[in-house]
Amino acid sequence: MDDLLFILALDFPIILLAVILKYFGLNSDSINAFLLIPLSVITIWGFHLSLKKKDHGIGLWFRISSFGPDLIWSIITFPAIFGVYILMNFMTSFIWGRNDANVILMNPNEIIAVISLGLFFPVMEEVIFRGAIYEYIKRFYSPEFSMVLTSIAFAVVHPFEQWMKIFVFGMLLNLLYYKRGTLTVSSTVHVMINLIYISFFYLPRG
């Protein structure tokens, strides 16, 4: 609990700034996206400091020594995970009658969308959820139960109608991290899926 309070204290200035901007009507999608960057970095650093005391910090989340085999793992597992992701997306769209187009097109600039949604945020999500939160929860519970809790946390930060899809996606990424013990595989797969998925919304309409 002390560790979580420490992380919340680190995040408090950014959260307070976001609340103030919202109160005065000065917030926007661009500002909120910009604030997510320092909030993510500070949160990751807080978890790193807490986990470092248990000999498990950022330095152990990625392993340079196994980078090549990890990339091969990413390529091998990608088709199956992407297939499940597309299936869950169809199910989500069927149940809720909505898709992610509005979220993807929130910023019509293709370059910004690719950099933020396709590259930066997938890696940040892996570091926060698979690296930091999962490893922190695993100190108290079994790996399997920690995967479930992490996937729930991963889902609830997304829009409600995407929870089912994101939970399943999170569990698959957790399994990759559990199997390889490095974020390289889950991060690479996450980035590839996001890049392919968002590219659908920017393809020229003939």
Image (cartoon, rainbow, N blue to C red):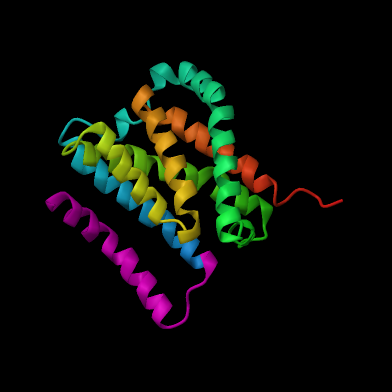
Residue at position x 23%, y 54% from top? 7
Asked if 66 appears above or below 92 in the picture, the reply is above
Picture coordinates of residue 184, whole percent (x, y): 44, 29
Would residue 115 be visible to someone looking at this image? Answer: no
Q: Say which quarter of the image contains residue 143.
A: top left
Q: Left or right? Give the position of 140 relative to 45.
A: left
Give the farthest residue toward the front: 95
Residue 30 at x, y percent in the picture: 54, 65
Residue at the left extreme of this rendering = 2
Q: Left or right: where does residue 34 sit relative to residue 199? A: left
Q: Main secondary structure of the magenta part?
A: helix
Q: Is residue 97 above or below residue 173?
A: below
Where is residue 35 drawn, in percent x and y? Answer: 43, 62
Q: What is the count of numbered marks?
A: 0
In the image, the segment drawn in magenta is 1-30
> Residue furthest toward the right?
206
Q: Is residue 25 left or right of residue 58?
A: right
Inspect this view and state whether residue 168 appears: yes
- Identified at 82% across, 52% down, the residue is 205
Residue 151 image point, x, y percent? 36, 44
Query: Which residue is located at x 61 percent, y 53 percent?
Result: 112
Magenta span contains residue 205? no
- The answer to whether residue 18 is magenta is yes
